[in-house]
Image: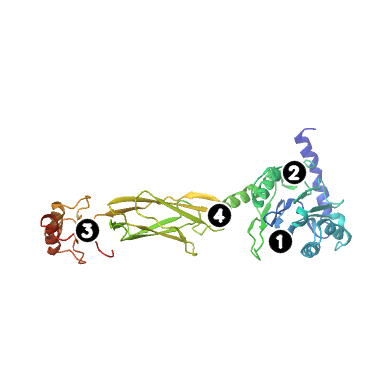
Amino acid sequence: MNIISRIFAKLAVPLLIVLALALPGQVFATFSIVAVDTLTGAVGGAGASCIDGSVMINDCVEGIGASHTQAYYLVQNKNNLHNLMAAGIAPDSIIHWLENNDYEATPEYRQYGVVTLANHGASAAYTGAATTPWTGHITGPAYSIQGNILILDGFVLDSIKAAFIRTDGPLEDKLMAALQGANVPGADTRCYGCNKPAISAFIKVVHPGDGGTPYLFLNVNSTVCAKNPIDSLQKLYDHWKLLANADPAVSTVAVAPLKVPASDGAHTVNITVTPRNIDGQYPRGGATVSLSHTGTGILSPVVDNGDGTFSATLTSPASPEKDTLSAIATAGDIPTPLDQQPIVAFLKCGDANANGTVNILDVSFIISWLYKQGPAPDPLWLADPNASGSTNILDVSYLISFLYKNGPGIICPSSI
């Protein structure tokens, strides 16, 4: 039988669904995975369904494990599972208890997946005999995969497992990849007519110390027929991943002042680096910053100010030069060279026209500015060789004395 024939053979399933609606409890035809990372302590789950609100099945107990309660869902059974997991009961014992203590004494209509951090990621699952086909589960170290009303027998669960196992990286990457493994039309058979796998999809991960705010929680609750919730969830997830990284264009490198006397360490430039993600926020999980420069001044170590900014100083060299600063912000384990590369100009005091030397042309430049509406020196302190704080005829006299009469040397301003 070819794949198309097998698909249409499954279309007898809606009759079973109609009959099932007469049963108490909410029908959750779902494919899902719960998993843990025993190294980091992360617990989480992902799933999708051809009904709204599939996230309802998920329960993550911080520092302990994760579970899904699906098929003919009853919140009372979910609450009992939560309490058993929170009490440290092993997954297989939890399943045994639920089978024998179903809230409505009809465990054959339930489906569960349970994984804990204890015992190297112990897992267990249960699929009641009366859940709607195709139905089943797969368990392994640190994961449990389960589904009902699925296309092509075990194809969906096998694809979820393969994607989960072959994906490296943190738990959230593995869960998102696992959900993509089921991204085929009609994965939940009721969505086959829409040519998509489901209507709703979610992913959730809880880290130790999260409290009431999960490390990751993304939920596409309801989509129109033309929209794929797993693809929509992937877009949300990709954006969420970027929030852990520094964005090269949004992050800033501020330098003040940009024009400084070349004074052999007598002046400093203040540098402030502000790493930000694509949304303009401090990267999730924090950041570090490193600086480099092309000049001969002394660059201080970078200091984390604890407020989302980083600071350093650059002391002036003895000789005029232009110094280009570069910053790398590392966030989410990704080093990102920032776009802004400020250039600091270290200038020779008394060099009013900023051509790199002090000579009679600077005298002429100052006179032209003072008395002939010529261009102004930039910055003004270049034309203040006696460092009096203002430029006037005395600076002209001082500069001529220095150049031609062995007068006192040019004085750089103490502050700028």
Q: CA distance from mark 1 to mark 4?
A: 22 Å
Please name the residue shown 24% across and 55% down the image: 348
Q: Specify the amino acid type for callout 3.
A: Leu
In the image, residue 326 lies at what x, y percent? 41, 50
Q: Which mark is residue 382?
A: 3
Q: Secondary structure at mark 2?
A: helix
Looking at marks 1 and 4 on the same chain, the residue that comes earlier in the sequence is marked by: 1
Q: Quadrant of the C terminus?
A: bottom left
- How many marks the image carries: the answer is 4
Pick whichever, 249 or 157, lies toward us: 249
Please name the residue shown 77% across and 64% down the image: 86
Q: Specify the amino acid type for callout 1.
A: Gly
In the image, residue 415 lies at what x, y percent? 28, 65
Q: Which mark is residue 244?
A: 4
Crowding at mark 3 (Cα within 10 Å: few <14, some 14-19, many 20+): many
Crowding at mark 1 (Cα within 10 Å: few <14, some 14-19, many 20+): many
Front: mark 3 or 2? 3
Looking at marks 1 and 2 on the same chain, the residue that comes earlier in the sequence is marked by: 1
Query: Which of the 4 image quarters holds residue 101?
Result: bottom right
Indicate left or right for 130 with 411 as reference: right
Residue bearing the label numbered 1: 63
